[in-house]
Amino acid sequence: MTKYFYLNGDKKLGPFIKEELIEQNLNRDSKIWYYGLEDWKKLSDIVELVEILNSLPPDLNTRNHQQKKEVFVTQKTQNVISAIKVSEKKNNKNLKWIIIGLVTLIIVPYIYQLFTNQTESDLYESISTSSYESDVDFQMYVDKFYRDIRFYGVYPKKPKTTIIRFSKLDQLNNTTHIHGLSYGSNDDDRIEIYINPSSWTSFNKPMRYFLMYHELAHDILNVDDLEEKTIYKGKLMYPAISDYEKKNMDDFIESSHELFEEIAEKQN
Ligand SMILES: [Zn+2]
């Protein structure tokens, strides 16, 4: 084990083992010697005693320097901390908006759906309960529809239940005049169509065919309405038909067969 000596003024003190040397009143410039060294060396120049050097308080001039540095570091750290806090705050704010956004995204359509489901089911209730039988032979349109679509090689399922009745649809919605509504498109075992009697009365024969085939296409073939664009006007699935659009049977045959052709093509 290395034994060390050190100089205190002119006095040579020692020998000490490292652990004992630490206890002595040393400074960076204290002169140290141990066996093997040619001459006395400053403590700060002896690598093996770096532990002792590190345990010493810094010199006064370096201390000032270090303090400044520390202050700077602290300030810098504080800046970083406050920057972090600011960004945390920002994040919190953002998070708040993200949550609000998400809640809105989830809740609003849910409420909307709940509401529209409610009003749709209310609408259905009022349509179906106020509907009534008439002496119009609606079944004739159904039979013709199945015959025509078979001609194109399309064989939709024959429903177990067919409900086609009059219901005063124009009383339910005052912005659009509704001629007919289909409620059986989700159910292949069921045809459920309500026809507005006032439309029926004002319509000529081809327009009645238009209306019946339009609703039957919804119900039996699950076809959607076309967009209300001028290029689609006159097609069977165009969502609007007015009684001033006097149609003839050729118009009807052309547009219904056009739709069946499209469906047959899609099917194959
Ligand atoms: Zn429609």
Image (cartoon, rainbow, N blue to C red):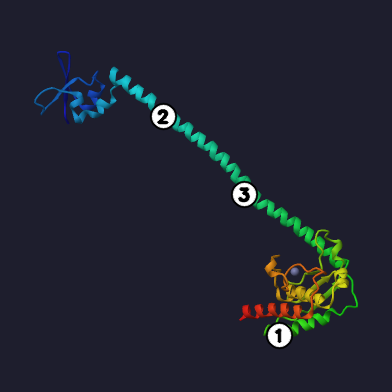
Local SS, label 3:
helix
Q: Name the residue under label 3.
A: 102
Local SS, label 2:
helix
Depth-wise, is mark 3 or mark 1 nearer the camera?
1
The label number, if any, that marks residue 150 in the structure image: 1
Residue at 84% from the left image edge and 71% from the top image edge: 195
- Classify the position of the N terminus by image quarter: top left
**Relative to 143, does residue 72 appear above or below in the rendering?**
above
Q: Which of marks 3 and 1 is nearer the N terminus?
A: 3
Residue at 69% from the left image edge and 78% from the top image edge: 258
Q: From the viewer's perspective, is 16 left or right of 252?
A: left
Label 1: how many Cα within 10 Å (few below 14, some 14–19, many 20+): some
Residue at 19% from the left image edge and 19% from the top image edge: 30
Residue 75 pos. (x, y %): 42, 26
- Kind of residue at disc 3: Leu
Local SS, label 1:
helix
Front position in the image: 22 or 178? 178
Label 2: how many Cα within 10 Å (few below 14, some 14–19, many 20+): few
Q: Mark 2 points at which residue?
A: 76
Residue 263 pos. (x, y %): 66, 78
Front position in the image: 30 or 218? 218
